[in-house]
Amino acid sequence: MIKKILIYTLVLVLSTLELECHAQNATILLDSTYVRCTSISSMTSINYKRILVLNSAGSRYANFVCTTDNNRSLKSFKCTITPMNGKKRTLGKKDISSTELSENLADDYTTHYLEVTNSTYPYMVELEYQTDYSNGYISMPSFAPAYMHGANVQKAVYHLVTPQEMSWSYKCVNMETKPHTRVEKGEKHTIWRLENLNPYKHDAFMPAMESILPHMYVTPERFLFYKIEGNSSSWEEYGKWQWGLMAERDILPDRLKEIVHEITDTISIRREKIRALYNYLGHTTRYVSIQMGLGGLQPMTATQVYENGFGDCKALTNYLKALLKECGIESNYVEINTQNPKILRDHASVYQTNHAILKVPDPEGDLWLECTNSEIPFGFLHDGIAGHDAVVYSNGTASIETLPNYPDSTNIINSEVHIRILGNGNAEVVVNEKYHNQCSENMHVITKLDPAKQTEIIKGEIAAPSCSISNIKSIGKERNHPQLHLTYTLESQDWISRSGNRMFIPISIFRRSSPQFNKERELDIEVRNGHTWVQKIQLELPQGYVIEGIPKDTAASCCLGSIKFTAKASGKYVNITIERKYSNGKYDAAKIGEIKGFFTSMDKICGQKIVVSKQ
């Protein structure tokens, strides 16, 4: 009887999906989380999911992954697979694979996983598992219904049970659902429900997923974590607890104190003292991740970092803070999220951050120092922190601050290109490029690669179908703001097309990369890295050829950017300038028509050709 009900459900859902969406890969029929807190030291979480997998692309939504540590244990697990035509299978805890391997140097994590598969489609998957928390907890499990591209959620439920006297708070993001509450036998039951969550289709210039997907944080006001009590009713209160974790962890051994003074005592300028110790940190330590017990929140001591020569982001940040303190410079430990730029100011939840950096107040402008990567220039705000909110710990508590961001005008790519065209239509090209500020971040990796990998990256940016690249030179400059100077030569036999005595020469050697938009725009348009790209191209025509046609100067613009093209002939040379700008910001989805029109115009401009003919 149960199987007949499940088969009927499969047929019913399938018929509905055929009407709603032909691109659907899976449907999450139910995503349920049941959390029971018996005290501030003990909590149980029971998760249940019922998933309809429609094709091979939808299989990943039914896979199981769970991480445990010294505080969390996987108490039970059950997986039932019901094909539409076939025999039902049941898997248990013994069928799960587990590994203690991780990318961290040291942690107490164990990852449990199971890849759920079936030879035919569609099929139903039911997952149910329980995790127990025995050493206290700093937050309840979050509520984030697991729908992504290609899968929707028909129903999601979060059921929280706590002692009636327990105080806790919640914060909904991108969801307006109101909880239903009741009290039974001295326990408070609070239930949130969401229904019919359709996935967003991937589109160009999408906002960060963290900023659009519905999720919820639930946090106890008074908590116990590894036998240390704290209060998270506000960031100020939570800051007191985190401050206590860092107490007396900045003590330096005598030899290290001597080194600090050897480095800084002869430097009279305060900012240069900071730079010198930042450089010392980069030269003498390396980054490794350590997540053991309180180590996920508490940094190693400064002495441990000095003796071992390594540390995670928390440890290296605390270490530099201690070095600066020894020479009389105060600084602030900072937690930040490198993926999501926003932190909820009215809800203190530790899981909103994933990284630690250091703030050094300075009369010339506050410094925000990345302590895990010595290749990041002193004081440079890389893409993972620029403009992001941060939790700043100072004077025994914490507050939220927003880091500055760079104006679009400082993010520049200058490309100077000389193209010598031979009489047989071949092209010899010399490229000289300079990447400034945030534009250098993505390209900086090229300085560390072997020639084959460098060539592969460069070819990805070149419009010539087949070409040979040589003489690659890349130099990274890291003073104040990063710069990358890249030069190379290129030879191509098929970039220029020919017809009789005519040559048709594209106005740019670089590949056009027009974004692909969906037919209907669901979300606002977001440009996260505003910048300017200026191409200055000089064409040197072959002997005996004259210009027959040259594109007119033209321009196009819209709310998010602009492009300007100019060309001028002088003797055997044609000098071309293409300047493209994108402006950082969010733009209403209603402007998609204007934006699509701009990119169409830009594609036409960049697709123009100069026509030359043999005399």
Image: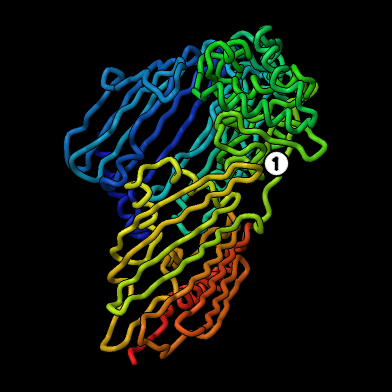
Residue at the location (39% across, 85% down)?
611
Residue at the location (31% across, 55% down)?
15
Q: Amino acid at mark 1?
A: Leu
Residue 312 sits above or below residue 85 on the image: above
Asked whether 470 or 77 is in front, the reply is 470
The image quadrant where one finds the N terminus is top left
Q: Quadrant of residue 76?
A: top left
Asked whether 17 or 336 is in front, the reply is 336
Asked whether 260 or 55 is in front, the reply is 260
Residue 235 visible from this viewpoint? no
Q: Position of residue 13 (x, y in %)?
A: 33, 49
Q: Position of residue 594 (x, y in %)?
A: 57, 73
Residue at the location (26% across, 21% down)?
95
Q: Is residue 568 left or right of residue 231?
A: left
Residue 492 visible from this viewpoint? yes
Q: Position of residue 351 (x, y in %)?
A: 59, 29
Quick one: SS at disc 1? loop
Label 1 packing within 10 angstroms: few (<14), some (14-19), many (20+): some
* Residue at the spot of label 1: 403
